[in-house]
Image (cartoon, rainbow, N blue to C red):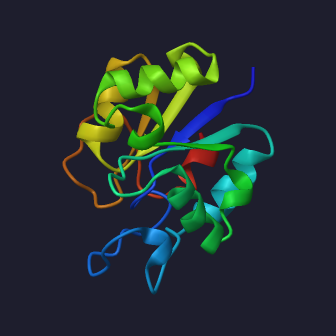
Amino acid sequence: MTAIYLFDWGNTLMVDLPDQQGKMYQWDTVQVVDGAEALLKSLASTCRVYIATNADDSAEADVRKAFERVGLDRYIRGYFCKQNLGIEKGSPQFYRKIAAELGVEPDALIMVGDTLDKDVLPAIEAGLNAVWFNREKAETASAYQQIRHLSELLEG
């Protein structure tokens, strides 16, 4: 079975610049997180890759446009957000609905994100595998799989 990855958007694959407001695709500057393109290029050759974001002010088309601006859209099969799921990220139901939409059991999904309480913990509670992108070296909790750089996903 092909692995299916879900990635958080802001500060996992693209930099959430604190001085910018509104929809990311309209920002003056957009940036890719270091290692994101190499990772997605590698994963997309053998895995299915999707975005699972908490962006409140962006619909699916807006998220896609941001990824198009930096050329990462070619590696992404789809985008899940509050607008198209009807559920806010940060709850196990968000992740269960994604699994249902994809027609797989939750344990077939691997969620990768930088926020423990919105990306990792609810994903685990929903039955997904999860990887905490703990780039800031926040408090380390050995109970969770962690990476400090996106390239570490390819090493495991």
Please identify the quadrant where the N terminus is shown: top right
Residue furthest to the left? 139
- Does residue 102 appear left or right of residue 125 in this picture? right
Query: Up-down: is 96 above or below 80?
Result: above
Please identify the quadrant where the C terminus is shown: top right
The answer, for residue 55, to whether it is visible in the render is yes
Please provide percent x and percent y for residue 21. 30, 75
The residue positioned 22% from the left and 54% from the top of the image is 138
Residue in front for this viewpoint, 3 or 98: 98
The residue positioned 46% from the left and 52% from the top of the image is 59
Please provide percent x and percent y for residue 120. 34, 35
Query: Up-down: is 26 above or below 136?
Result: below
Please provide percent x and percent y for residue 37. 65, 64
The residue positioned 53% from the left and 71% from the top of the image is 32
Residue furthest to the bottom? 28
Q: Quadrant of residue 124?
A: top left
Residue in front for this viewpoint, 80 or 9: 80
Query: Up-down: is 32 above or below 93?
Result: below
Residue in front for this viewpoint, 8 or 116: 8
Please provide percent x and percent y for residue 5. 59, 37
The residue positioned 63% from the left and 43% from the top of the image is 78
The answer, for residue 155, to whether it is visible in the render is no
Query: Up-down: is 10 above or below 152?
Result: below
